[in-house]
Image: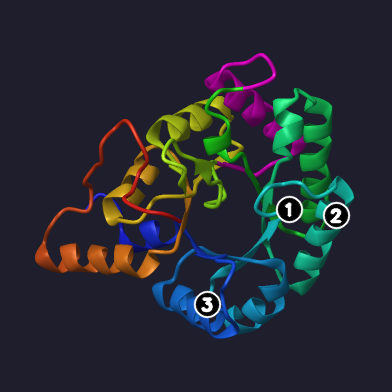
Amino acid sequence: MKYTYDELAQTIDHSLLHPTMTDQELDEGCRLAARYRVASVCIKPYAVKRAAELLKGSGVNVGCVIGFPHGNSTTESKRYETELACRDGAVEIDMVINLGKALSGDWDYVRQDVQAVCEEAHRRGARVKVIFENDYLTRGGAGLDADAFKRRLCELCEAAGADWVKTSSGYGFVKQSDGSYNYRGATEHDLALMRASCSAKVQVKAAGGVRDLDGLIRVRDLGATRCGATATAAMLDEYRRREAAGGSASGGVSTGGALGSGGY
């Protein structure tokens, strides 16, 4: 096996973010996260206190989204949301940048927005993942092509104190040519680009579209240390199946597109 079970399980932030998630589904999701020994749950602000109660002593961290999913809250709202989440037991924060400001080239605003959340979180012992929403950045912006734009965001987030840069929210739906809405989420290209654009002090998180074991393995191969997922049980059950069969847990996926077969 290329990776141990624990190495892959500790890559996963189990996502509990669907807009219709019930209290029962939250409880079940937290218990699943504890059973599979993943790195964290990634949840909405109102649910932090309950998740912290359920996961106490389990070794699974509680992570909370901030300014989710579109990053449009004021900086002070994001800072205060971070304060409340940390008070309730969150030790990881997944914040969304202000995309409109970034695409406008207002880099000072974006840096200050990220820095405010990072300073609040770090003051309270939490770490921060900064979400770019790369599906919205395919044409670049502020006079930069897409890759240069993402590199600029990586550099800015590192300077602002981010602990991770993250590809997507899992809810960055883009209108398609047939009128439907969809997204790609994490891609191999973006993960490699983001890893190369940050120093070793900043980690990379994949989110969106990683729904099978081979995709999770490829995320690790590309240097990402975390992966948002709803298909946690399916991926880790497949690991155990391959392990029992004496098979490989080092398979790959195609190099051009998204890393999995479905949504976050």
Task: State if disc 3 and disc 1 touch (CB < 8 Å).
Answer: no
Residue type at tag 1: Gly
Residue 40, position as x, y percentages in the image? 54, 65
In the drawing, does residue 130 fall left or right of residue 209? right
Mark 3 Cα shell of 10 Å, populated few (<14), some (14-19), many (≥20): many
Residue at the spot of label 3: 30
Residue 84, position as x, y percentages in the image? 82, 67
What segment carries the magenta color?
141-166
Residue at the spot of label 2: 77
Work out whether mark 2 precedes mark 3 in sequence or the reverse, and give the earlier one: 3
Question: At numbered mark 2, what does the secondary structure look like: helix, strand or loop?
Answer: helix
Residue type at tag 2: Ser
Task: State if disc 3 and disc 2 touch (CB < 8 Å).
Answer: no
Work out whether mark 1 precedes mark 2 in sequence or the reverse, and give the earlier one: 1
Work out whether mark 1 precedes mark 3 in sequence or the reverse, and give the earlier one: 3
Q: In this view, which residue lies farthest toward the top?
A: 143
The relative height of residue 259 versus residue 93 in the rendered view (above or below) is: above
Task: State if disc 2 and disc 1 touch (CB < 8 Å).
Answer: yes
Q: Looking at this view, is 43 or 195 the one in front?
A: 43
Question: At numbered mark 1, what does the secondary structure look like: helix, strand or loop?
Answer: loop
Residue at the spot of label 1: 67
In the drawing, does residue 111 fall left or right of residue 20? right
How many angstroms separate mark 2 from mark 3 (CA)? 27 Å
Q: Looking at this view, is 145 or 85 the one in front?
A: 145
